[in-house]
Structure formats: C-alpha cells, structure tokens
Amino acid sequence: MSNAIKYWRKHNKVYPKISQQKLADLIDIDRPTLSKIENENIPIDPDEAMALKIARIFSLLITDILRKPPEDKDE
C-alpha cells in the first residue's frame, strides 16, 4: 500500500505532485510518519481510516489506495 500512496501523491489530479508535508497536514499526521508509510522497506501501513482520508483527498476509491499502483514511468 505504501507505494500506492506515494504514486497517488505524485499523480493525482486534485493536488498534483503534493508534498509529503501537505498530505501529512491534510490527514493529521506528521511528515516523518507519512515518510515511513511510503517507504517500502518499512512495514507500516496506514489504518483504514487514514486510507479512506487519503482516497477522499485525491477523489479516488479506497481500492485505488489499497492496491498496487500503476507503473510509475517518472522514476
């Protein structure tokens, strides 16, 4: 799930290329926590409520946040 959050943070139409800090502020967590969630080497996933908040912010379905993201050709 962490890769999906990172992908949608970079590729959403509501907040294009939103920073970690801005998204963290919107979901009421600190930036280091969001960074850990996005880091695929650290096994931390957001809880259901946080995933739902992120989906709502980006106008996505929660399944978009929970599943593997499309290939990121920018990386």
Image (cartoon, rainbow, N blue to C red):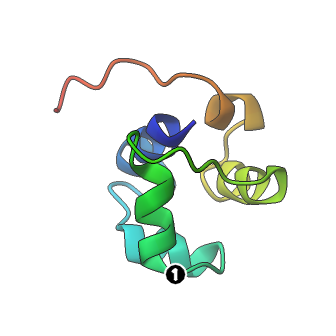
Q: As displayed, is residue 26 above or below residue 2?
A: below
Q: Nearer the viewer, residue 26 or 44?
A: 44
Residue 64 picture location, percent across and down: 64, 30
The structure residue drawn at horizontal position 47% and vertical position 42%, both measured from the top left corner, is: 8
Q: As displayed, is residue 71 above or below residue 7?
A: above
Choose top left, top right, bottom left or bottom right for residue 3.
Answer: top left
The amino acid type, in three-letter code, at marker 1 is Asp
Residue 21 picture location, percent across and down: 40, 77
The structure residue drawn at horizontal position 51% and vertical position 70%, both measured from the top left corner, is: 33
Choose top left, top right, bottom left or bottom right for residue 53.
Answer: bottom right
Position of residue 36 in the picture relative to residue 59 (left or right): left
Position of residue 34 in the picture relative to residue 65 (left or right): left
Q: Residue furthest right?
A: 49
Q: Report the quarter where the N terminus lies.
A: top right
Q: Nearer the viewer, residue 43 or 51?
A: 43
Q: As displayed, is residue 68 above or below residue 26?
A: above
The residue indicated by pointer 1 is 30
